Image (tube, helix red, strand yellow):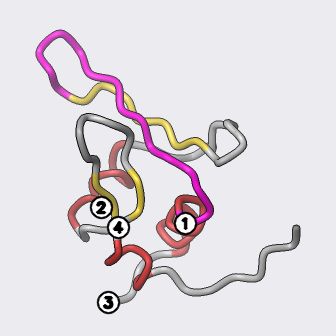
Amino acid sequence: MDISRTEQRILHLLAQGGRIEIERDENRKIEAVKCFTRDGWVYPGFGLELFRKLKQKRAIKSSGGGPYRITERGLVLVRAEQDNR
């Protein structure tokens, strides 16, 4: 399965230790999503539509009510990129 460039960037960020946190309204519906890098910075351009695409592809999941992290399937989908650290 091929994934888009933006999905690829998010999965790579999550593979390095990032997380996705969601905010819910009083009716428990998802109001906003934020993607954080491993350093705690918010990644710009991440929205609800991209979150739903990644969740539909089962590339991310939450366990125990915690933040969303990359899954084994997500690791398979992400292509290797050189880390310039």
Residue 14 colored magenta?
no
Q: Say if mark 4 contacts mark 1, CB within 8 Å.
A: no
Residue at the disc numbered 2 = 53
Q: Amino acid at mark 3?
A: Met
Disc assigned to residue 71: 4
Identify the element where label 1 is drawn. Answer: helix
Q: Amino acid at mark 2?
A: Lys
Disc assigned to residue 1: 3
Give the mark, 4 or 3, whose residue is nearer the N terminus: 3
Residue at 32%, 78% in the rendered image: 73
Q: CA distance from mark 4 to mark 2?
A: 14 Å
Residue 22 colored magenta?
yes
Q: CA distance from mark 1 to mark 2?
A: 17 Å
Q: Residues within 10 Å of mark 1 (few under 14, many from 20)?
A: some
Give the mark, 1 or 3, whose residue is nearer the N terminus: 3
Disc assigned to residue 15: 1
Q: Say if mark 4 contacts mark 2, CB within 8 Å.
A: no
Q: Say if mark 3 contacts mark 2, CB within 8 Å.
A: no
Residue at 69%, 82% in the rendered image: 81
